[in-house]
Image (tube, rainbow, N blue to C red):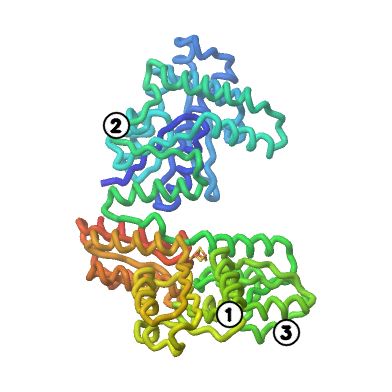
Amino acid sequence: MFHDIAIDGPAGAGKSTIAKLVAKAVGSVYVDTGAMYRAIAVHLLREGVSSSDVSAVEKAVSEIDVLIRYVNGEQRVYLNGDDVTGQLRKEEVGNMASKSSAVPAVRAKLLDLQRGLAKTQDVVMDGRDIGTVVLPEAQCKIFLTASVEERARRRFKELAEKGVPADLEKIREDIAQRDLQDSTRATAPLRQAEDAALVDSSDLSISEVTAEILRIFYEKNGIFLAKSAGFCFGVERAVDLVEEKIREKRPIFTLGPIIHNEQVVREFENAGVVTLRDEEALENVSCGTVILRSHGVAKAVYDRLSDMPVAIADATCPFVARIHEIVEKESAAGRRIVIVGDPSHPEVAGTTGWSKTPCIVVSTAEEAEGIPLPPGTPVCVVAQTTFNSQKFKEFVEIIKHKGYDIVILNTICSATEARQEEARSLSSRMDIMLVLGSGDSSNTRKLYGICSDCCANTYYIQALVDLNKVHIQADSCVGITAGASTPNKFIQEVSKECLKSKA
Ligand code: F3S
């Protein structure tokens, strides 16, 4: 059985961009049907044929040969042997393609070719009638749309970036007109197939749309990807900051590995980033930019850096920075700080450095019970952002009974809570659960613990080779979640391997 994916939707919804990314992620061939229609439109324009003159279009089409080839990984489109790739994105070509694609002879010509491709390999095809007419048997059908306003805005931005003057209102009207034309034409009008999943990209980034479509595709194959798997907002922000600084071409140092992922750290090091293993290594830094990672650092580190001839690029996650503020303020007001977290974790080490008085760190129920403070002490309890939320609640109950004048602030970040909750719910429904991430990632280890409690066949996957110990049957329901520093690329590689194991 071939895993064909059909992506339909109105013009400007981002179908071709997304289809290419989806094809790359699942290892399928991307068949650019829009480019094929546009190649025919180039021919009709060259020959001066009107799209309303059906017999002239039929005759012109009978003379056409359209070929798609990949040259150095790039798609090239040939019209009667002539490479017309550069002409396909022109406005007039797009308009002609929309009109001429309604002519039955044009559609018939391409239909055979497209179906032939899907019979011999896994394909991803995008267009207006792929799920309804071209590949009605496609395993996964997506109807990708976005509001007229959003599509007009995207087109306007695209033209502006190329320096082409454009009128936003005119673009908006053209898109609305084209929608009407496409959805009311007699032959194969644009409509959502009954079994297609609707994806509205109006408020989503390209990577979010791609991830959603991959999630739908893998689900059809018994592989369930947690929506919250992979980079969290704070890690993404830190990685983006490093990439931005690399472009500035100054010496760059990160204080500790920027994320808990060796591959990503190595890629940055290959691009010239120097990872300082600890604070002592700052002694050897005399210029450039020091990037503080999302875990945050103690106040003393900021003080030290401000006395050095370096720029500070601060990627401290705002959720962590909020804890620093709380700890500084509450300790200044005379409260003793209790941090529920792992004392060896860099975030916790950094947080303790914001307190005016020594902090107490508890990571077990026994330690919570044994807090050496007398009843009546003013205490403020906070949590490491990635701590297990259920355990935090348990420990808080213990601390509450010790008779302190207590302020409790649940500072576990919402991304962590959502990820843990989804992992709990997903793993309780799966035959096999895979938790992806580095062995030294604290939040991945906690996810593994949560999933192991709910699913007996839970595996910690740090590299593709770890999949060798997992026995996936064709009918296994496989769940996948991943820690906050697990790159999307690895999640997709594992998903693809799982799909292969089911074949
Ligand atoms: Fe920030 Fe939460 Fe990620 S604290 S770094 S968003 S896990």
The span from disc 1 to disc 3 (Cα, nearest Å) is 38 Å
Residue at left 39%, top 88%? 370
* Earlier residue among tags 1 and 3: 3
Residue 265 can be seen, yes or no: no
Give how far apart the Cα atoms at labels 2 and 1 are.
64 Å
Q: Which residue is mark 3?
A: 284
Residue 461 in percent (x, y) is at 36, 70
Dot 3: few (<14), some (14–19), or many (≥20) neighbours within 10 Å?
A: few
Q: Earlier in the sequence, mark 2 or mark 1?
A: 2
Q: Mark 2, residues whose alpha carbon is within 10 Å: few (<14), some, or many (≥20)?
A: few
Name the quarter where the C terminus is drawn.
Answer: bottom left
Query: Which amino acid type corresponds to the residue marked 2 in the rendered image?
Result: Glu
**Amino acid identity at mark 1:** Gly
Q: Nearer the viewer, residue 58 or 361?
A: 361
Residue furthest front in the image: 376
Of residues 212 and 269, the one nearer the viewer is 212
Count of labels in the image: 3
The answer to whether the residue labelled 1 contacts the one labelled 3, judged by CB atoms less than 8 Å apart, is no
Question: Quick one: label 3 or label 2, which is nearer the N terminus?
Answer: 2
Amino acid marked by disc 3: Asn
Circle on res. 334: 1
Residue 305 locus on image (x, y percent)? 73, 77
Circle 1: is it few (<14), some (14-19), or many (20+) Cα within 10 Å? some
Side of 324 relative to 118 (left or right): right
In the rendered image, which residue does mark 2 sit on? 194
Q: What is the C-alpha distance between the residues marked 3 and 2?
A: 64 Å
Q: Is residue 81 left or right of residue 62?
A: right
Along the viewing direction, whichever of 353 and 369 lies nearer the viewer: 369
